Image (tube, rainbow, N blue to C red):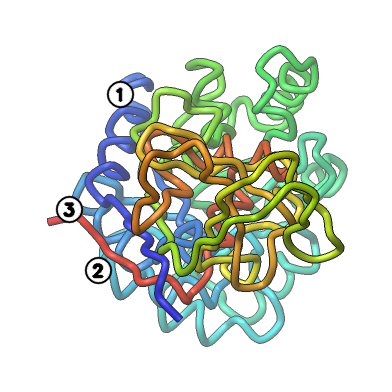
Amino acid sequence: MAHAHLTIDLDAIAANWRALDETSPPHVETGAVVKADGYGLGSGRVAATLARAGATSFFVAQAGEGREVRKAVGDEADIYVFAGHLDGDADLLTASRLIPCLNSPDQVARHFSRLPGHPFAVQLDSGMNRLGLEPEDWDALKGDLIDAGPRLVMSHLACADEPDHPMNARQLTQFRDMTDGIAHRRSLGATGGIMMGPEYHFDLTRPGVGLYGGLPFAEATPVVALSAPVIQTRTVRPFETVGYANSWEAKIESRIATISAGYADGLIRAMGPKAQVYAGNTPCPVVGRVSMDLITVDVTHLDEVPERLDILSPAQGVDALADAAGTIGYEILTSLGHRYARHYTGGA
């Protein structure tokens, strides 16, 4: 079966990092979140590009992700692990020189007993109730942790994609209440926090989705383009149906193109009824259900059916496609499958 093409613009990722870096005061470091295989785009390529752009602090979700990033960025960069020090991680944390973000009293005890003297960070729960030391645990352990010298003390915002949400101010206050007065670097804002202004920046910011062209960084340079070949076209007469479960019925004689991509490639099945693909700047509605390997598209209005149709392009970014699927751009990016013929541009 013909391949869909995924093009990843590494120069655009670097440009987005620089743009986000410029929003912070000079004393604030801008890190880079490269978890989930660089948001699905290849953590090694992405991290190496960002290191050349000037990033020196990187964040992954799990220790296993840090190995590839270490190879890409060299020995000097800091690589933080959001999940912390899990049982069985000690050898990998040591070998790849990773910095676990300790999240619980159990992790603190594990790290200090198994890797005494190894660098660590501390993650605090400022209200999201997902990861991090609770305020009472922080109060109990703060003295020992501060004496041991964390590389970073951080928390994470729950509602940063909604700048006016009152939760943001509550978490900012909670984080300050927990950390004001310590002599160690602090971090609170990811992409959304950066967008809310310097009071959320502290000493280090952690942009993630904004690097890859996603909201809430509306001014981001697009990073990904995705096109799929048209492998067949057909004429469908009025009242004939297309796809599984007869979910679309032609009202007029229609020209239907079948393209080579589907939910096995990360194109979410739920997007079918609302999604569009593009012939240049001309939208073409998806008709019928998105199936595992194929998508059917109404191209009746085109004078000529192109050899390929664009799924992600300047005309439609990841967040627009996500809206059609009832999800977010993060899921679109991290779901992009491995069957695509991947092409990287820039990054030198």
Question: Residue 32: image x %, image y %?
Answer: 41, 47
Measure how far apart labels 3 and 1 are at the Cα level: 21 Å
Q: Which residue is mark 3?
A: 346
Tell which tag, 2 or 1, sits nearer the viewer.
1
Q: Which residue is mark 2?
A: 74
Instruction: Name the disc covering residue 22, or none.
Output: 1
* Residue type at the position of mark 1: Glu
Q: Could you tell me which quadrant the N terminus lies in?
A: bottom left
Measure how far apart labels 2 and 3 are at the Cα level: 20 Å
- Vertical placement of residue 168 versus 119, above or below: above
- Vertical placement of residue 34 versus 339, above or below: above
Question: Residue 334: image x %, image y %?
Answer: 56, 59
* Residue type at the position of mark 2: Gly
Q: Could you tell me which quadrant the C terminus lies in?
A: bottom left
* Mark 3 vs 1, N-terminal side: 1
Q: Is residue 76 visible?
A: yes
Q: Name the residue: 60% across, 68% down.
A: 294
Measure how far apart labels 2 and 1 are at the Cα level: 24 Å
Tell which tag, 3 or 1, sits nearer the viewer.
3
- Label 3 crowding class (10 Å Cα cut-off): few <14, some 14-19, many 20+? few
- Label 2 crowding class (10 Å Cα cut-off): few <14, some 14-19, many 20+? few
- The residue nearer to you, when weighing 35 against 318, is 318
